[in-house]
Image (cartoon, helix red, strand yellow):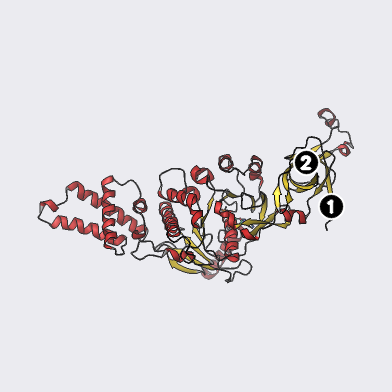
Amino acid sequence: MEIQEQVGTVLDGATPLNFPFKVVKGDIPLHEYVKVEVGKNVVLAEVVGVGARNPIVREKIATLGINGLERYGYEVAVAEVLGYLEDGRIMRPKYAPKPNTPVYLADTQTLQAFYKGDMERLPVYIGTLIHREDVQVPIHLQDLSFHLGIFAQTRGGKSYLAGAVMEKILTNTNFPVIVIDIHGDYVMMDRAAENDRKHDKFNVIVYYPPNAPRIKGVTAEVKDLKLSPKQMTNEAFLELLGGRLGEIQSIWIRKIIKEFREKGRSFGLKDIIKEIESIVENADKTSDTNNKLQSGEKKRLLSILARLEDLGEEIELPAEETPVQEFLRPKTLSVICLRGLRSRIQDVYTGILIDLIFRNQVAHYGDLKKAPPVFIFIEEAHRVASQEGGRYASKVISTAIREGAKFGLFLALISQRPRNISPDIMANIGNYAVLRITNAQDQNMIESASESFSHRLIDDLPALNQGEAVLVGPFVPLPAIIKVSKRETVHHGVTPELALINNKISELIKEVRWERW
Ligand SMILES: Nc1ncnc2c1ncn2[C@@H]1O[C@H](COP(=O)(O)OP(=O)(O)OP(=O)(O)O)[C@@H](O)[C@H]1O
């Protein structure tokens, strides 16, 4: 049994929601947890305001420089009531604590009882309370059915935290995880952080589109990501071509793709190019005027051809396909590495993959081999789920986030600009892991999208340090500010250490001079 440490006394003006108290011992930092008796219940509260008072030191007196007045000073804190426990459930009190009631520091045991993982809801632990490194905060994977938003400004620690959630899912459950990796932050997750050697906790497969630049030093299994035009919707294929196609041009493309589909054969980008070339050639050769192309028509086909050839220079769309169920193997992380591709291509790839997985989950719902529950993490979500309506990826994500959870599709959107995410998509995010954010528009977007994100928590966001996050939503027993624990696997998004690199370059320069000499 821990000894109760009184740190304050409740002052006048308490309500069931919050209460001021005079600090009687030590310094109480913001976000410290205290407990107080209300009736028969022990109520937990979080310190949300701290201030120093001294009734003697008024402005006039302060200028006189009188010694010894400090002893009349004291501190006052304000605590926000979190609740009390009844049969393991957190209840809100209906009464205020009485003035003059002692306020105690919440001991580890009490705090851990509030932040208790419910085994039925699959708890995993990614961090500890910021002032209490001995109190683990659970997040319940079951409640990721309300999806997750991971938001922070650049270098705030988003991908570090996302990787922590992924490694916990993969280590503690059999579910597959897919990450759309725009910057190559997750490609080293097959290695243990402690010794940089391969671990055997889960499998990691890194997929690159053919022709996409590859990252050096990857030790995970590497495969080609083969997406064929046959797997794509017409809309996705047209968006890959970029820019605005004329109506008749898109009718041509739809017609050609339809004919390929009807033949039931696999086909790639090259086959579509060949088909158009042969239409133009045959029309040129024929003497039958009915089969000749009008000059406008020929121009249109040639312009489509040029667009297809340009696309072929950027990416290869083979006739072969990577079967979507390959990404759904148990305990496997599929890293879809799109680093180095143009953002338009990255966005369409993201849309195609989410669409394929969503359709697979719907088609094979209930078949645990073909369509197990899957967690999908999407980087740069402000681009692919942006509010500039009508874009393919955004439409696909909007459908997946609205309807996917029923079919075992749990999404995590990662972004440094939540203000650009479509409000329709934001409205479907129930859980938040938010790190440091100073931009007011981003803060407003989060506050207006989330019922559980109080204004008080929003005010805390600019003051967070790197690696500190506010967790809010049904996936945590109570809102919490945590320090994200050290990663178990290697994070490839580490900020380059300039001093170290500079020294290495100096050595290289020395070596070159020595050789010349
Ligand atoms: N909890 C943590 N403990 C230790 N280091 C951390 C932690 N969180 C983040 N970092 C470090 O901070 C740096 C930035 O983190 P991270 O790559 O996750 O940022 P990000 O928000 O994804 O950045 P970007 O927007 O540039 O992709 C990295 O060097 C990472 O190793």
Q: Which residue is under mark 1?
A: 4
Q: Which residue is under mark 2?
A: 77
Residue 78 sits above or below residue 346 on the image: above
SS for callout 1: loop
SS for callout 2: strand
Which circle's residue, 1 or 2, is located before the other in the chain?
Answer: 1
Q: What amino acid is at disc 2? A: Ala
What residue is at 46 percent from the left and 68 percent from the top? 222
Asked if residue 289 lies left or right of residue 187, the reply is: left
Q: Quadrant of residue 160?
A: bottom right
Residue 251 sits above or below residue 11 on the image: below
Residue 409, percent across and down?
Answer: 50, 56
Ligand 1 visible in quadrant: bottom right
Q: Which labelled disc corresponds to residue 263?
A: none
What residue is at 50 percent from the left and 42 percent from the top? 423
The residue carrying pointer 1 sits among few (fewer than 14), some (14 to 19) or many (20 or more) residues within 10 Å by Cα, namely few
Within 8 Å: ligand 1 and the Cβ of disc 1?
Answer: no
